[in-house]
Image (spheres, rainbow, N blue to C red):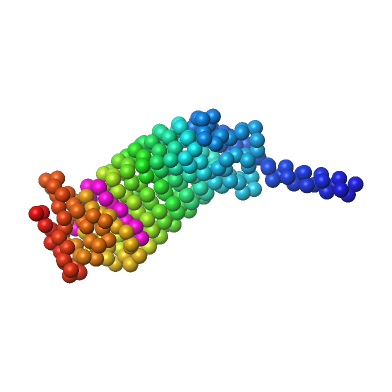
Amino acid sequence: MKNLTTLFLTVLFSFSMLANVSLSEKDALVKLYQATNGNQWTVKWDLSSPVSTWYGVKLQGEKVVSINLADNNLNGEIPSDIVNLVSLQELNLHKNYLSGKIPSDIGNLKNLKVLNLSFNNLSGTIPSSVCQMNNLKDLELYMNMLSGELPAQIGALKQLEVLSLYNNEITGQIPTSLYDVKTIKILLLSSNKFIGVLSRDVVNMSSLENLSLFDNKMNGQVPFELEKLNKLKEMNISYNMFNGLVSKDLAVLDTLNMTMINDRGVAVLLDVTSNKNTAIVSED
């Protein structure tokens, strides 16, 4: 009798470990599956099995905390129902065939720490609601067709460490609020359509290790304050319209040695001197 009781409790415990999430969260996952042509995924979900067995889905208790479906042949649009997964901490849909817009209410995912929608075919603007995700550390939207300006309040993401938006069609200036994010380590904005100056407030980004503004339309003086970023190891700000003085220290950091495009569309190299903070522009 004791052995039967033990067996019963073991089976009961096993079933509890496979408990399904709430109906609203399961419905959100099913909507994602259906909206992205799930029957053609590389690794499919068996919708008749417990959610805990679904590929790329991680649960804590009965809450979905992570979805990682990178490189899994998702094709379609991200359904707005995704925002019902309110406990989600990671959403990684990197390298698929997603199109359409990022859901406007994506900011409802308040617990999200990682949002990676890179290497897809997403269009439209980056929703301003992104700025409400106070726990976000990693925002990667590179290699899409996103346009419009960066949300003005992007600097509200005070824990952000990675912002990777390269190879899109983002316009406008770098929002002033972004310069106040002291936690940011990697800032990759290359191959967009950014304009305006690089603010001297870049010095506030004291954790910055990698800065790429390559291939934009930014102009004005290259701020000397860049030299004060002691953790900066990689930088590429070439193929903009920056001008003025530049030091050897900065030129060494820049992959293309400060090659710029002048107002006539001609590539020019900022002439570097050995004296710190002293250089002239050469157009020879």
- Please tell me which residue lies in front, 125 or 213: 213
The C terminus: image quadrant: bottom left
Say left or right for 164 vs 213.
right
- Please tell me which residue lies in front, 82 or 188: 188
The number of discs equals 0
- Residue drawn at x 15%, y 64% as measured from the top left: 279
Q: Position of residue 165 (x, y in %)?
A: 35, 47
Say left or right for 125 vs 19.
left
Q: Residue furthest right?
A: 1
Within the magenta stretch, is there residue 209? yes
Q: Which residues are magenta?
A: 208-221
Q: Position of residue 50 (x, y in %)?
A: 65, 38
- Residue drawn at x 28%, y 45% as measured from the top left: 191
Say left or right for 35 vs 273.
right
Within the magenta stretch, is there residue 87? no
> From the viewer's perspective, is residue 83 above or below residue 6?
above
Q: Position of residue 159 (x, y in %)?
A: 44, 57
Residue 36 makes an appearance in the image = yes
Q: Quadrant of residue 229?
A: bottom left
> From the viewer's perspective, is residue 204 above or below residue 111?
below
